């Protein structure tokens, strides 16, 4: 049975909850803080299902700041499998024209990008610059006009990163509980009159406790404050108490292709004239179809951006594997034809593994949020790029808790906490969502 009294409870031990818990405990060492999750370990929600890439190449200055600072911190960590492969956006003529202003502003803001002509790109083995033929016409596959390479981008291992924060949190004396499902947030009145039915509308309401299912029994945990870091499941706890969770979930799928030793595609794994040693993360000019190479595992991860057809889900099921499965038909009908145009050798391989996860979208501007309603702080809405902003968001949550207007991010940049709240929200809408 899980019960007791805390100063602060962080619900959700994905990257955002773990980072928040650590920064909260670091800033408030004497506070009794509990981090809990319904999974048996940290980082097993959508953090584990992600593509695990990071980039600072965003159109929005806010995303640039949040990601850049987090990436700088992650780059100091030795054990999170971080590799700077770079991102190579392969742009059509049209995309290139539309992106001109964004690329210029990235450079102005100190984002390290280089641009490559299609002649330079033609040195990438197996890459087709000008798709031709019936299928190319049918799917309207544009020619590659240029490549935009983000230098400070790459991949990492999200479970290791999440555990890094959980370990640091535990070492500071933070409490962690797994297999602990929060069934509800219980609200009451700040000045409890013991009348029953409180809070009445004339009272100041606050969250008092959570009801937790743990080891088959329901327990109550009282706390002075709560952080909701439940990702795609944020609405499940906030909406019943009248707080808008501002999250819409959407299924996304990833497909793994094995590069058998000696096969044609295995030579693509690590050869790159653009970036020595590693094939950059490639984004093709059609439907943001992407290719991630992991040479040490001899595999590629493939996915794409699907705007239409995939429904938004307000209250997703917690059982992703049961409810939101990846489908090989989705791969063969949607992704394979695109791969076939630009990397035909890759397209002949059948996925050896596939899985789905849930993006938690903030559909207004695709920038994450961290906001406070009374003694409840919520963080999320990361729209498919929360891991790469995890450190900054954890720091902002800790600053909100301490009532600070500004949060000092890693590297010394100050960021106004209210900017990513909702009452005084002031962010640049993100245009480069992947
Ligand atoms: C296919 C895919 C690809 C992605 N690719 C990338 C990428 O390349 N780079 C990147 O930065 N991001 C990527 N993302 C997004 C990334 O996964 C998220 O931004 C990130 O995981 C959000 O972290 P989180 O902690 O908010 O969510 P989660 O990791 O989902 O954590 C939320 C936790 O809350 C727990 N929880 C929820 N409700 C309760 C409850 N009632 N009681 C107890 N526990 C609860 C869950 O068990 C879960 O562990 C991708 C996502 C998907 C689905």
Image (cartoon, rainbow, N blue to C red):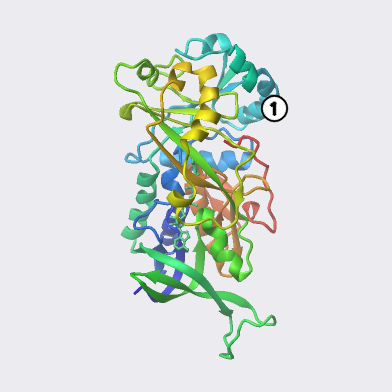
* Left or right: 264 in relation to 390: left
Residue situated in front as seen by the camera: 323 or 205: 323
Instruction: Give the residue displayed 41% in from the left and 23% down from the top.
Output: 349
Q: Please indicate whether residue 423 sits to the left or right of residue 20 in the image.
A: right
Vertical placement of 418 versus 99: above or below?
A: below
x, y (%) of residue 129? 56, 13
Q: Find residue 376 and report its image quarter.
A: bottom right
Question: The residue tagged with tag 1: helix, strand or loop?
Answer: helix
Mark 1 sits on what residue? 101
Q: Name the outermost residue toward the left.
A: 261
Residue placed most toward the observer, 6 or 354: 354
Query: Could you tell me which residue is drawn at 48 percent across and 30 percent down?
Result: 152
Residue furthest to the front: 329
Is 398 situated left or right of 270 in this image?
right
Name the spot of residue 109 as percent of width and height, x first.
61, 33
How many residues crowd mark 1 within 10 Å: few (<14), some (14–19), many (20+)? few
């Amino acid at each position: 049975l899980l019960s007791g009294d805390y100063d602060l409870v962080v619900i959700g031990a994905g990257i955002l909850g773990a980072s928040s818990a650590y920064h909260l405990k670091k800033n408030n060492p004497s506070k009794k803080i509990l981090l809990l999750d319904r999974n048996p370990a940290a980082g097993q929600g959508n953090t584990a299902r992600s593509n695990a890439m990071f980039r600072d190449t965003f159109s929005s200055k806010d995303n640039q700041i949040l990601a850049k600072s987090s990436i700088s911190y992650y780059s100091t960590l030795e054990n999170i499998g971080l590799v700077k492969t770079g991102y190579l956006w392969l742009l059509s003529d049209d995309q290139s024209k539309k992106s001109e202003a964004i690329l210029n502003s990235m450079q102005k803001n100190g984002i390290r990008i280089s641009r490559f002509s299609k002649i330079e790109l033609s040195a990438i083995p197996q890459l087709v610059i000008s798709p031709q033929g019936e299928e190319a016409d049918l799917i309207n596959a544009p020619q590659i006009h240029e490549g935009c390479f983000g230098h400070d981008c790459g991949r990492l291992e999200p479970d290791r990163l999440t555990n890094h924060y959980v370990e640091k949190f535990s070492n500071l004396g933070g409490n962690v509980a797994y297999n602990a499902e929060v069934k509800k947030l219980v609200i009451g009145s700040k000045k409890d009159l013991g009348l029953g039915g409180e809070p009445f509308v004339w009272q100041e309401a606050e969250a008092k406790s959570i009801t937790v299912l743990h080891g088959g029994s329901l327990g109550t945990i009282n706390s002075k404050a709560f952080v909701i870091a439940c990702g795609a499941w944020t609405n499940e706890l906030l909406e019943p108490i009248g707080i808008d969770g501002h999250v819409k979930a959407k299924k996304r799928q990833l497909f793994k292709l094995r590069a058998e030793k000696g096969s044609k595609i295995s030579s693509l794994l690590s050869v790159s004239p653009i970036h020595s040693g590693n094939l950059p993360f490639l984004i093709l000019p059609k439907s943001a179809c992407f290719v991630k190479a992991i040479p040490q595992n001899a595999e590629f991860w493939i996915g794409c951006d699907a705007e239409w057809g995939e429904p938004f889900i307000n209250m997703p099921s917690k059982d992703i594997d049961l409810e939101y499965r990846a489908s090989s038909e989705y791969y063969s009908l949607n992704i394979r034809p695109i791969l076939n145009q630009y990397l035909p050798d890759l397209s002949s391989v059948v996925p050896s593994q596939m899985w789905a996860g849930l993006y938690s979208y903030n559909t207004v501007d695709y920038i994450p949020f961290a906001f406070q309603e009374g003694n409840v702080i919520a963080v999320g809405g990361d729209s498919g790029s929360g891991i790469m902003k995890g450190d900054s968001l954890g720091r902002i949550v800790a600053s909100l808790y301490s009532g600070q207007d500004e949060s000092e991010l890693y590297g010394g940049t100050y960021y106004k906490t209210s900017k990513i709240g909702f009452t005084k929200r002031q962010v640049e809408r993100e245009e480069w969502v992947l």
